[in-house]
Image (tube, rainbow, N blue to C red):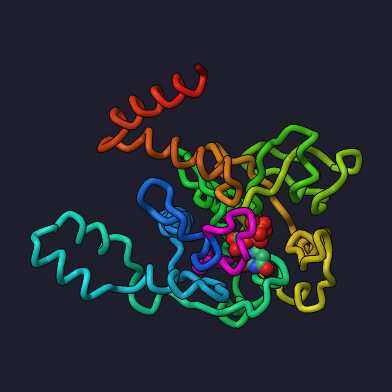
Amino acid sequence: MTAKLRVAVFPVAGLGTRFLPATKAMPKEMLTVVDRPVIQYAVDEAKQAGIEHFVFVTGRNKSVIEDHFDRQFELEHTLEQRGKTEALQLLQADLPQPGKTSFTRQQEPLGLGHAVWCARELVGDEPFALLLPDMIFKSEQGVLAQMIAAYEQHGGNVLAVEEVAPEDVSSYGVVGRGEGPDEGFEITQMVEKPKQADAPSNLIISGRYILQPEVFELLENQAKGAGNEIQITDAMQGLLGKQRFTGVKYKGTAFDCGSKVGFLSANVAFALERQDIAVEFLHELNQIIRAAKR
Ligand code: UTP
């Protein structure tokens, strides 16, 4: 029997330098895709997968994320007075249950691995999901829910992976593929940002993890790796051979909202799915494209 996955960690302490100046005073996780902040998509995915407790590793300028997951009495009161019940219901539906969120700070952005380590006391001695909110997905079943199916079968650690062009592997964490189907295969190797010639495959880790708590022990003494940052992939590499790592080639489309093109594409893709604006937006979009071609 595998231990139930209750807790999810959201590292949101990065500097977001690729989005300056937008991210000078505002966290990149609060940039909006249509009308929801990017972080909300990852939280929704975790909620749908049955996660009960949400741990945020924040940094300076990030208190607005905490406010986003809190009540806004003044706003709620004004909406109520103006009879805007639909907007009010929308706010209430997104609100986490009292006591089900925790916030800690990564005082210096020393890397993703370090951000995860900062959550160790809040997670404790149990498996946890790690969701990088930059990555959002359009999929029939949520990506974390797809991974939980593999976790229930294999236990241990589970990573969501996707295929990229071989020349792009050097920007990502890359895994080696062993036995098993797309829904759950054994991972034989992991390497962060390898040169194309050294990459074990073109399967990259795409922002969703289920990890066992032993990873915190490795992160405790983890030296800096690629990009002079403490890398989660290096810590996982240290556990490989001692614990099972399963890869799930998820069904769905990823948008990397940490990059400008990914973020803009996400806005287009999600807007075109929205009943309230899709027709009008498509019309505008076609006009913009036509004008750009001239
Ligand atoms: P990224 O490397 O994509 O985020 O980290 P970044 O450093 O903020 O972005 P750029 O490259 O400067 O534009 C992936 C995730 O890990 C978090 C980020 O907030 C993001 O959600 N992160 C990264 C931390 O929480 N702490 C860190 O030290 C680094």
Q: Is residue 233 above or below residue 185?
A: below
- Residue projecting furthest to the front: 294
- Residue 194 coordinates in the image, percent (x, y): 85, 48
Residue 221's place in the image compared with 263, above or below, is below
Q: Which quarter shows the N terminus?
A: bottom right
Q: Nearer the viewer, residue 124 or 44?
A: 44
The residue lying at 50 percent from left, 41 percent from top is 264
* Residue 85, visible in the rendered structure: yes
User: Looking at the image, which residue is at 63% across and 40% down?
Assistant: 249
Q: Is residue 274 left or right of residue 157?
A: left
Instruction: Tell me the residue at 68%/77% (across/down).
Output: 108
Question: Farthest residue in the right direction?
Answer: 197
Is residue 45 visible to the viewer in this orientation of the structure? no
Q: Which residues are magenta?
A: 4-22
Locate residue 256, reporting x and y percent. 58, 46
The spot of residue 135 in percent (x, y) is 56, 50
- Residue shown at 69%/50% (left/top)? 246
Task: Give the left or right position of residue 70, taking residue 163 as reference.
Answer: left
Q: Is residue 18 magenta?
A: yes
Say if 278 sits above or below 133 in the image: above
**Magenta residue check for 203:** no
**95 relative to 84, above or below:** below
**Quarter of the rendered structure image containing ligand 1:** bottom right
Where is residue 52 drawn, in percent x and y?
43, 68
